[in-house]
Image: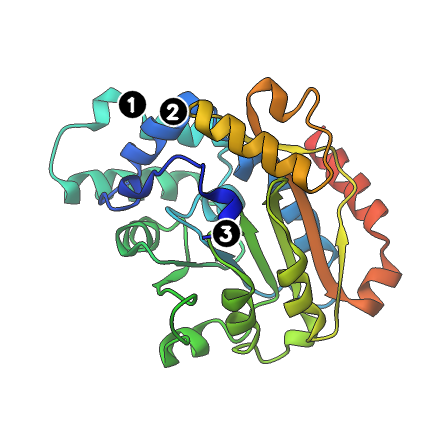
Amino acid sequence: MDDTLTGKADFEDIYTAPDPRPYFRTLGPLDYRIPGEMLPLVVQALRSAPGPQRPVLDLCCSYGLNGALLRTDLDFAGLTAHYTGADLDEGTPEARIAADREFVGAHLRGDAPVVRGLDIAAPAIDHSVAVGTLSAGWAEDLESADPSAELAAGIADTGLLICTGGIGYVSQTSVERILGCLEHPERVWVLCSVLRSVSYDAVRGACSSYGLVTEQVPVPPLRQRRFADATEARSAVEGARAWGCDTTGLEDDGWWYAEAWLSRPAADAEALPVEDLAAAAGRLAA
């Protein structure tokens, strides 16, 4: 973990349940929202990348929330309402997974993109694949080991790599190992939200080594969630200020805020300025 994240609350136990109910019930009261905040940018990146649409890989995907938003007609509020409903507490874990599969299936888009996931939490991956929020998934720790042969083969055709909130927990090591698996790493787009207390320089360098150009997406800071306690608040404010960020009206008001970064081939960046992509995403969000 990045040293600047040592003040963050530890929610590791919410990723070990057989379904995401503890996840939503823990993060819901903190107004966790970064997948929804990033969604217009992710959708616009999918639409804007040249050539036929290629699969998405969600790094640090947890329970496949980005996959759910991309593959169904549900918004983040709808997901939260489903997974925090008291009427869903009864029955075995298998019965709850069956109910989740039926719920996701009822909202699945006919043109749903292929979204695959990578996370160290096997229960989260297993649930996401079982219910259909992810097309496929792998539970591997690329910070400490090379990708398995199965993972390398499974993600080789990735066209868009996303990470919404995981940078800092994972580093350029994971990104480098993913890019090294791809058939055409020089063509991939990489879109990440990064807390303002965390440096993106090393990941930018990893992308640059494959010829990708990295730009900050010119959108207002994105809300990730409210602080869990005073320790988080102090860590976020001090970390953001250390990178030259003005925290007035942002972290000072009790929220983790993130910035969006996009890496892509230089020709793509020239053909579609990042300002135009951001404006198009803004129209989607309106």
Q: Which amino acid, by three-letter code, is at mark 2? A: Ala
Disc 1 element: loop
Compared with 147, 201 (above or below) is above
For marks 3 and 2, give the CA distance. Answer: 32 Å
Left or right: 76 in relation to 245: left
In x, y percent, where is residue 253? 60, 18
Q: Nearer the viewer, mark 3 or mark 2?
A: 3
Quadrant (top left/top right/bottom left/bottom right) for the C terminus? top right
Picture disc at residue 85 = 1
For marks 1 and 3, give the CA distance. Answer: 35 Å
Q: Which residue is mark 2?
A: 81
Q: Residue at x 11, y 39 (%)?
A: 92
Residue neighbourhood size for the residue with mark 2, other residues' Cα within 10 Å, grouped as few (<14), some (14–19), many (≥20): few
User: Which is nearer the eye, 161 or 105?
Assistant: 161
Q: Residue at x 32, y 30 (%)?
A: 83
Q: Which residue is mark 3?
A: 2
Quadrant of the image occupied by residue 236: top right
Q: Residue at x 45, y 44 (%)?
A: 68
Disc 3 element: loop
* Residue at the extreme left of the image, as rendered: 92
Residue contact at pointers 1 and 2, CB within 8 angstroms: yes
Residue neighbourhood size for the residue with mark 1, other residues' Cα within 10 Å, grouped as few (<14), some (14–19), many (≥20): few
In x, y percent, where is residue 182? 56, 76
Q: Which amino acid, by three-letter code, is at mark 3? A: Asp
User: Which is nearer the eye, 145 or 212?
Assistant: 145
Q: Nearer the viewer, mark 1 or mark 3?
A: 3
Q: Residue at x 54, y 56 (%)?
A: 113
Picture disc at residue 262 = none
Q: Which one is earlier in the sequence, the residue at label 1 or at label 3?
A: 3
Q: Which one is earlier in the sequence, the residue at label 3 or at label 2?
A: 3
In x, y percent, where is residue 34? 55, 36
In x, y percent, where is residue 273? 86, 53
